[in-house]
Image (spheres, rainbow, N blue to C red):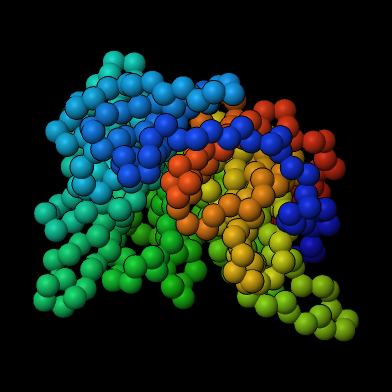
Amino acid sequence: MEPNKDPFLLTPGLPAAAAPVRHPSPFPWNQVALVFPAPVPDSVAVLTLDDKLWRLELTGPELRRVEVDDEYLEQVSGGELHAMLPPSPTHLAYLQTRRLVLYDLKWQLAKTWSMVGRLEEVASRGAWVSHTPQVLAVELEDTSNYARKSRIDFRLRTWRLEGEKRVKLGSMELGSVVGAVKWDAGAGLVAVQKPGVPLELYGPDLAKPQPEHPLALALRKLAVDGLTLQSLRLHPSLPVALVALGRDVTPKREEGKEKPEDPGIWRVSWEGAPAVTVRLARHASGESVTLGPLSPEGDWLYYRVLNSAGRDPQLYVQQVGAAFKPPLSLGAVPEKGAALLWTGGAPSLVMYDGTKDALAHWKLAGTAAPAKPPASPRPDGK
């Protein structure tokens, strides 16, 4: 595959987005239970340990906190909490130990569904397979064998929400090594990558892999010259995926042969067959890329790039929807302890750093500079 000669090499010297507006957090870190996305312009949601739900508005130079509700569930802020992306413009979502909580901002009502099959299971991560119907995948930690064998088992389970009920669609064992399996969900698919095995795509029932799916075929074509999958994100509703491929060391160029393909980030779409691939950016061998979720409209992506020197990762944002724009550098961000959250409305990104009780807010609408577009999209990715 001929390399795409695009100019977007990921370096801290790339054009920067407008400087963020920085705010001190109105809540000390030891009062914050969860900071999570809200489908409201320039806002994020916060659960505090006094069982209150808040919205932080970052529309101007001064941060404004708005109390949304309190004690709307038994133990609002108790247990293990994990953020989820909003499933609609009017709902918040998060996992709380063994249940999913959806909060309706319009009617100030919360609904819950159990996500487990036994008391020993705890939900640790969730992602929407589709919004209509509402189908989600949840990673579960099972401690049934912990006391006897010092082992925690991990599994993936999918559910369809139907009013007050939930219907189990499928289940998959993920082994007993923490974080060994990478997965994502969206566009009606669940993507799973187990150690030493190429990424596999499944339907909502997790029944059988789909090796002939256009995305699976495209990934096999992209994985050349020793490139391996580092990160993948599925669009919540459109047949689109963002893929980061990398390698550990720079390969030697052999005389008479083409230069090996550079590591980078690709956009893959499969409205038709075969899939269309476009490279959005390049990065160096030895660097690793972690893709964040897409913005609510699916038009922007953020990602972290970590090099082998062990410095804090560099954060970038890029417009990846109908229009392709060059990456924008947001600078170094903490590797741990900082949450990155898209807001609703015009694209903007918020970083909550609990170690410093601070928030940074980047407004991105209109900040992407004109760019020479990547080479014309072609089914072969050239």
Q: Position of residue 77 (x, y in %)?
A: 24, 38
Q: Is residue 99 visible?
A: no
Q: Is residue 78 visible?
A: yes
Count the numbered circles shown. 0
In depth, the one of 31 and 97 nearer the eye is 31
Q: Residue at x 11, y 76 (%)?
A: 148
In depth, the one of 312 and 40 nearer the eye is 312
Considering only vertical position in the picture, is 225 above or below 279?
below
Q: Residue at x 58, y 21 (%)?
A: 60
**200 with respect to 143 (left or right):** right
Considering only vertical position in the picture, is 161 above or below 306?
above
- Extreme residue in the right direction: 256
Quadrant where the C terminus is found in the figure:
bottom right
**378 with respect to 207 (left or right):** right
Q: Position of residue 324 (x, y in %)?
A: 73, 40
Q: Position of residue 296 (x, y in %)?
A: 51, 32
**218 with respect to 262 (left or right):** left
- Extreme residue in the top direction: 107
In depth, the one of 348 and 359 nearer the eye is 359
Among the 4 quarters of the image, the one containing residue 370: top right
In depth, the one of 261 and 11 nearer the eye is 11
Considering only vertical position in the picture, is 334 above or below 49?
below
Q: Position of residue 193 (x, y in %)?
A: 45, 64
Q: Residue at x 18, y 50 (%)?
A: 116
Quadrant where the N terminus is found in the figure:
bottom right
Q: Residue at x 32, y 66 (%)?
A: 174
